[in-house]
Image: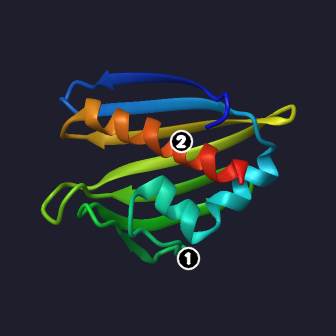
Amino acid sequence: MSESQQAEVVTEDAQGEHTVEVNALLPHDIDRVWHVLTTNDGAEAFLGEGARLGSKGETWHAADGSHGVWRSYHPLEQVRVSWHATADAPRSLVDLHLAPQGDHTAVSVRHERIQGDAAALSDRWRTALARIDALAED
């Protein structure tokens, strides 16, 4: 893995729902990171084993039971998906944002409306950013 820098924030609102935000500065230009995210390998790195890239409105499923819908793409800027941890879990939202930082890329994953284990999801998104970083090295 390259020398990426990561940080995270976990907050809770008045209804007891959590928001997790994990940020990383990846040592790859934004074109390279975006290219990785727009492949099946990149979708799997982001969402988990078995997830496949889809068009807006298409569903995605990972081997661990998490699933959702591809909500939006903004090239070189953002990917948004809905997220269900299991078949019966409530919907939450995951936004992945990109911003150029010279020849590096700032990447932010923000997961909102979490009713489950926020710490586990924070770990999941840190690991996802490390996988995206590793793919961008290839």
Of tags 1 and 2, the one toward the viewer is 2
Crowd tier of the residue under label 1, counting other residues whose Cα lies within 10 Å: few below 14, some 14–19, many 20 or above: few
Position of 18 relative to 35 (above/below): above
Residue at 39%, 70% in the rendered image: 50
Residue at 46%, 23% in the rendered image: 8
Amino acid at pointer 1:
Ser
Query: If you read the primary sequence from the N terminus, does the residue marked by circle 1 or circle 2 appear first?
Result: 1
Q: Position of residue 115 (x, y in %)?
A: 19, 40
Q: State which quarter of the image contains the C terminus.
A: bottom right
Amino acid at pointer 2:
Leu
The structure's colour scheme is rainbow
Q: Using residue 96 as the reference point, say whether residue 89 is left or right of it.
A: left
Q: Which mark is residue 55?
A: 1
Q: Can you tell which quarter of the image residue 97 is in?
A: top right
- Residue projecting furthest to the left: 88
Task: Estimate the spatial distance between the alpha carbons at disc 1 and disc 2, rounded to whole Å.
Answer: 21 Å
Residue at 47%, 75% in the rendered image: 57
Q: Using residue 48 as the reference point, say whether residue 13 is left or right of it.
A: left
Residue hosting label 2? 129
Q: Using residue 97 as the reference point, say whether residue 84 is left or right of it.
A: left
Q: Position of residue 30 (x, y in %)?
A: 78, 46
Which structural element holds mark 1?
Answer: loop
Q: Position of residue 119 (x, y in %)?
A: 27, 29
Residue at 37%, 41% in the rendered image: 124
